[in-house]
Amino acid sequence: MSTLSALPVTDQSALAIEGFDAPEHRLAGTGLAGLAETTLPREKRLEAMRVGELGSIHSWELSTAVDGPGTRLVVFLAGCPLRCLYCQNPDTLRMRDGQAVSAEDLLALVRRYRPVLAATGGGLTLSGGEVLMQPVFAARILAGAQAMGVHTAIDTSGFLGTACTEEMLANTDLVLLDVKSGIESTYTRVTGRALGPTLDFGRRVVAAGVELWIRFVLVPELTDAAENVEPVAAYAATLSTVTRVEVLPFHQMGRDKWATLGRPYALGDTSPPAPELTERVREQFRAHGLVTH
Amino acid sequence: MTTTTSAPAGLIPPSEDPWRGFIPGSWMATVDVHDFIVCNYSPYEGDAQFLCGPTDKTTRLWNTLERQYLAHERRLRVYDVDTTTPADIDAFGVGYISEDDDVVVGLQTDVPLKRAMMPNGGWRMVETAISEAGHEHDPRIKEIFTTYRKTHNDAVFDIYTPRVTAARSAHLITGLPDAYGRGRIIGDYRRVALYGVDALIVDKERMKDAVAGQDFSEDWARYREEHSEQIKALRALIRMGARYGFDIARPAADAREAVQWTYLAYLAAIKSQDGAAMSIGRLSAFLDVYIARDLAAGALTETQAQELIDALVIKLRIVRFLRTKAYDQIFSGDPYWATWTDAGLGADGRTMVTRTSLRLLQSLRNLGPAPEPNITILWDEALPETFKDLCAAISVQTSSIQYVSDEHVRDHWGDDAAIACCVSPMRTGKQMQFFGARMNIAKTLLYAINGGRDEMTGSQVVEGFDPICSDEPLDYEQVWAAFDAMLTWVAQTYVEALNIIHYSHDKYAYEAIEMALHDSEIVRTLGCGIAGLSIVADSLSAIKYATVTPVRDDTGLVVDFTTEGTFPVYGNDDDRADEIAQLVVSTVMDRIRALPRYRNAVPTQSVLTITSNVVYGRATGSFPSGHRKGTPFSPGANPENGMDTHGMVASMLSVAKLDYADALDGISLTNTIMPSSLGHTERERVRNLVGILDAGFGSGLFHANINVLNRATLEDAMADPESYPNLTVRVSGYAVNFVKLTREQQLDVLSRTFHSSSWGPP
Ligand code: SF4
């Protein structure tokens, strides 16, 4: 973990991330509709993934108003180094559970939706899982999309921020940074990882002059303590390119997926936050002068 | 037969000059409302600041209506029925909601919400409806309509063939207008205001006699007879107007009269016909010309202008027909589709949005939302941004608007077309439709596999087709060939039924007043419909891309399927599945085109189910796609409920691929999106919805019915209907009060895809 956060910014050995793996599965009927899958042998696939010609993708959708402005082509990349207790996409956590899709095909999908994305003031969002698990592939997609004039965003926990090159940042119009907790110990409890890399990455995004949205998932009795929210708000307030904060109330829409995967789910009995609680937390952010929804 | 269209003698305005200040044009010489509008209307691109709230009179009137009538009706289902007066244009005396506060007058009967019987369509339906409403029918009236006067329904069953009755009772063909009025005819009610009824009578007499010298033929005789019926109806319209104290023989002289005259013309239609859809047409730009003239002259204030539009809208909210409970299964929520079409662009590129378009939308705020009139916005990216924002804001707040592609409508039907019913476009006053309900193409697929045996009953309904007997996985080519053959049989049977119905309807329940407000030579379309598109597309996709094995009962009947592997699904912008849907729609159209049609009607197709998706589903078996026996079909051209997993826009793009040229009667998509999935702030939600509509229509989509709702709201409304009397949901090309739906239909609405964001509130 610590070795990861100490990686030099441009070091491609970030690809040695544990879990970087070629997908095993064939294209499912839903999720990747319209994208061709790749049938290269595993060794070739892994090689193509290292150079970013191939990515492991869970699914895509056209969604509105959640992962950036307008209607967006949101691509969920497979693989994540975190293990958030509330993860709503536990089926995206392992890269080998995704499906191999070539950069060329994914960019063709972006091209197909360019008119729609333009009409709605939207763009492309790479989400996951964790987009920075596949930094070379992601960089290639972002560069290609931006070259087409499509607004680009990444949705990341920032934990693998060092894997994001300056060039990749330059090809990103908006970073949605999930700051899952303000207290180190709570962060680790929630995600199984350290908080530092996320905070470092946020500062780098600011230094690069890229717009930032800070997202905070509010889970009753896990992340809702005022002392836990406060440092997140204070941190966000130091980041000059932050244009909004989104407080996302925890929900149980991922519960079935945990059950299907047969993995233990710690939050089975947790309720969504009461509206008053959500409002209190939003106010905490607003008190720092942050535009908060 | 040829007729000429030179200037009628009667189109000269009376001395007070109702046409003062209007820009002259060919509309002065011939009946041509479209030309009048193009010459005179003022496009409006500004904001909504000028709009006014309700007057005291409006509020009082609406409250009276709500307290004394609507609240009772919600409890009783039917407020009251007149059982002694067969309806007609001038059958009833006058009636008011409130004599003091009615700004626009005229009721269908003598009391608001009291329903009239219209037995020309058929006696049985009337008798059932009367008894279901808790009343006794009048034996004298029954005697007349069962002994002396033949009805539309009698005639249809005299002519029906064995295959029609077989397909009808097997639910291969459902909802045929053989016992109720066909509707989907929009009289050009504006003509009465612009020209006055006298001039229209003179015109019709002239057209009738224009053929007097020609040889006898049945067409010729029918033409002359229909004109006589139209002229009699116009005379009855004058009498009806006179009872309310208006001389509508002459043109309307000001805005107040223009609204009143137009409404009286529409009222004559709904007094004499209970067509399934009684749409009012495209009024805003027309009425705006009169309102603008009066405003400029200081004869009217903006407050009064709004009061007029509000008053008209109130009248359109209380249209009622006597219906049976069985009818409610197909068209639930008591709709009558007083569809009011608005906006769009003119052929010259100017927007047809006027200040009165905004006044119409304002009525939803002044009176609160309601399903009727079914406000239909012809959308184009080039509409004024302020207007687009206003529409989207109303959709976000109340879900009470639907949208149709202006480009498709304008390209095919011109810039004075209006929508009848849900999605059926027609040139106003120049075109009518023979409405056709729909055939169940999902069931047709199962019949193809079972060689004409019904999958629910096992009985042999269609003869002469071989079943697919092998127990090997189904072969796509073989199934397609069998489907096409069975589809051809069903289409033949269906079009045969429609020909019989419309022949009989013209003969025994002719819409004289509506047709009097049409040109003498018109275009007729035969609107054929299909139900079950998504099931057929997904099932064929499963057969093609996965492994589908039939499951048989001990008589060899295929009653289910096992599907192994995955397959592309319609509604996810996946070309592989969407191309199958396209192929199905174009094949249906080809089969219909090949058939003979009553009055040489132009064949068209609609992919629209109204709310019959529930009854169709109940009568249909299980499918390779995973669709289960007895469960509701998704509505219209919608993807299968819950199977469009790539977001609302992807689902729109799939539906947009269906070629409008194959389905000129309309392709209906009903979407539900949660408010939180449109954005955090009101402004964001509005702009995002505008973007989605621009994107969808820009991609070729024909229709979008947009609900912005939370599932929880609907669940609350089911549990506590009294608290949600005005909760409006769009079901399939129209809106209903959610609490008026049957429980089964409410559950159907809840089972549909709610497009949500992953991190939206739970
Ligand atoms: S970072 Fe996101 S994808 Fe990864 S475990 Fe956490 S919630 Fe799940």
Image: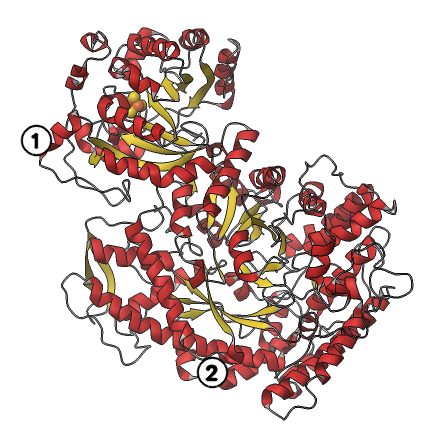
- For the point 14% across and 65% down, which residue is it? B471
Q: Do circles 2 and 1 both sit on a common chain?
A: no
- Residue extending furthest toward the bottom: B215
Report whether residue B68 is seen: no
How many marks are shown on the rendered structure?
A: 2
Residue in the foreground of this view, choosing between B270 and A277: B270
Residue in the foreground of this view, choosing between A45 and A23: A45
How far from the left and from the top, in percent, is residue B66?
72, 48
- For the point 42% across and 36% down, which residue is it? A117
Q: Which mark is residue A43?
A: 1
For disc 2, the chain is B
Q: Which mark is residue B160?
A: 2
Tag 1, which secondary structure? helix
How far from the left and from the top, in percent, is residue B405?
52, 51
- In this view, B69 is above or below A92: below
Q: Residue flagged by tag 1: what amino acid is it?
A: Glu
Q: Residue flagged by tag 2: what amino acid is it?
A: Tyr
- In this view, B636 is above or below A254: below
- In this view, B745 is above or below B82: above
- Residue extending furthest toward the right: B15
